[in-house]
Amino acid sequence: MVINTFIYKNGNEKAFTANGKNTIVPLYSPMNFPIENSLTIKVVEDCHVIAFPKKKFADLLQTNKDLNNQMYISYIKHINFLLYENLSLINNSGITRISIFLVLYINEHNPNDNVIPLSQKEIANLVGLNLINTSRNIKTLKDLNIIDTGRNKIIVLDINRLTDFC
């Protein structure tokens, strides 16, 4: 998994996408945006990385239909995530946001043994909660034996019960 993060001038970060397999990151644009200088990419799990100059990647998109289609799918996933996140921030409790994120992660990435290799701070950043509320909600799920925790990881023990919080 790869996490895209925006870094504010004061040094604070806000993660805005968590991308899984078969995703092109960062998304390509033929235009230059000033915000691009404030974006970071953090690799959380093993992945295959290929770097291209912008012009070369533009040429590849023009000549490779499969690559162009995968870029299109990546855009759709990205926009869907951002829309869903905004609606979730307005309407859902902290435990619901965490549960939705964990279920989506499991469904998208199919990790071995349902292990999600993220710290509570990273999850807080992705779901738009502060660390204290994230820790409290994770403790609630842990006390209910729905998840377990370890150093920089969450283990989903009961996906069906976790889904009930979504």
Image: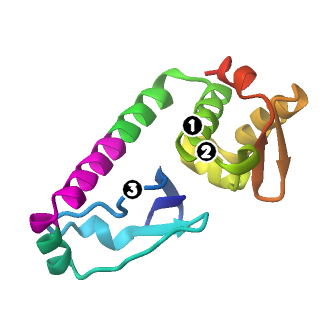
The answer to whether residue 17 is above or below residue 159 is below
Residue 104's place in the image compared with 56, above or below, is above
Magenta segment includes 69: yes
* Category of crowding for the residue at label 3, using alpha-carbon neighbours closer than 10 angstroms: few (below 14), some (14–19), many (at least 20): some
Q: Would you say the magenta stretch is mainly helix, strand or loop?
A: helix
Q: Which residue is mark 1?
A: 107
x and y, in percent, of residue 92 in the image = 55, 23
Which colour style is shown?
rainbow
Total numbered circles:
3
> Which residue sits at x=63%, y=25%?
96
Q: Earlier in the sequence, mark 1 or mark 3?
A: 3
The residue closer to the viewer here, 28 or 71, is: 71
Say which quadrant the N terminus sits in. Answer: bottom right
Badge number at residue 23: 3
Q: Is residue 106 above or below residue 17?
A: above
Q: Are marks 2 and 1 in contact (CB under 8 Å)?
A: yes
- Residue visible at 26% across and 55% down? 71
Could you say which is closer to the camera, residue 33 or residue 73?
A: 73
* For discs 3 and 2, the disc positioned in front in the rendered view: 2
Tell me if 5 is positioned left or right of 163 in this view.
left
Image point (63%, 54%), residue name: 122
Q: Looking at the image, is mark 3 or mark 2 earlier in the sequence?
A: 3
Question: Can you identify the residue that label 2 sits on?
Answer: 110
- Quadrant showing the C terminus: top right
On the image, the x and y values in percent for residue 115 come to 73, 49
Question: Which of the labelled discs sits on residue 6, or is there none?
Answer: none
Residue 139 in the image: x percent, y percent? Answer: 84, 36
Q: Which region of the structure is painted magenta?
A: 61-79
Q: Say few, some or many: other residues with alpha carbon within 10 Å of mark 1 (under 14 / 14 to 19 / 20 or more).
A: few
Report the amino acid beneath label 1. Answer: Asn
Under tag 2, what secondary structure? loop
